[in-house]
């Protein structure tokens, strides 16, 4: 498993800026600003999606381990095996993208 290179911590959002607690009292550090080139509702939705990214990456890593434990490494031709292979491939592609490997 690749080491996490992103800013660790619980990311939060006010709807337009994604922040993370710096560990010093209540100080927050900006991780991302959502640009105003879209509607306010879309900016807020994008901000929530970005703020959830660390948790989603952790969930994908867990899902990958669980899928491999249940289905094994991708192989075979049965429908169950094909679904398992597709799921594992999809999860691995999303993890690679989040880690900057694709």
Image (cartoon, rainbow, N blue to C red):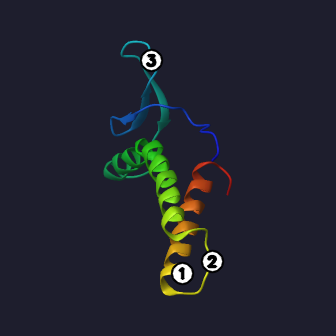
Disc 1 from disc 2: Cα separation: 8 Å
At mark 2, the secondary structure is loop
Residue 27, compared with residue 34, is above or below; it is above
Q: Earlier in the sequence, mark 1 or mark 2?
A: 2
Place residue 28 in its image quadrant.
top left
At mark 1, the secondary structure is helix
- 3 or 28, which is in the foreground? 3
- Specify few, some or many for label 3: CA neighbours under 10 Å numbering under 14, 14-19, or 20 or more: few
Place residue 4 in its image quadrant.
top right
Q: Which mark is residue 75?
A: 2
Q: Earlier in the sequence, mark 1 or mark 3?
A: 3
- Specify few, some or many for label 2: CA neighbours under 10 Å numbering under 14, 14-19, or 20 or more: few
Residue for badge 3? 23
Residue pictured at 43% horizontal, 13% vertical: 24
Horizontal side, residue 43 vs residue 79: left or right: left
Residue for badge 1? 82
């Amino acid at each position: 498993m690749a080491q996490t290179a992103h800013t660790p911590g619980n990311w939060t959002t006010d709807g337009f800026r994604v922040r993370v607690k710096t560990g010093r009292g209540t100080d927050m550090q900006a991780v991302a600003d959502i640009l105003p080139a879209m509607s306010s509702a879309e900016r807020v939705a994008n901000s929530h999606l970005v703020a959830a990214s660390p948790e989603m990456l952790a969930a994908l890593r867990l899902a990958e381990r669980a899928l491999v434990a249940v289905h094994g490494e991708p192989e075979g031709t049965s429908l169950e095996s094909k679904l398992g292979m597709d799921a594992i491939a999809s999860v691995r592609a999303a993890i690679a993208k989040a880690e900057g490997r694709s």
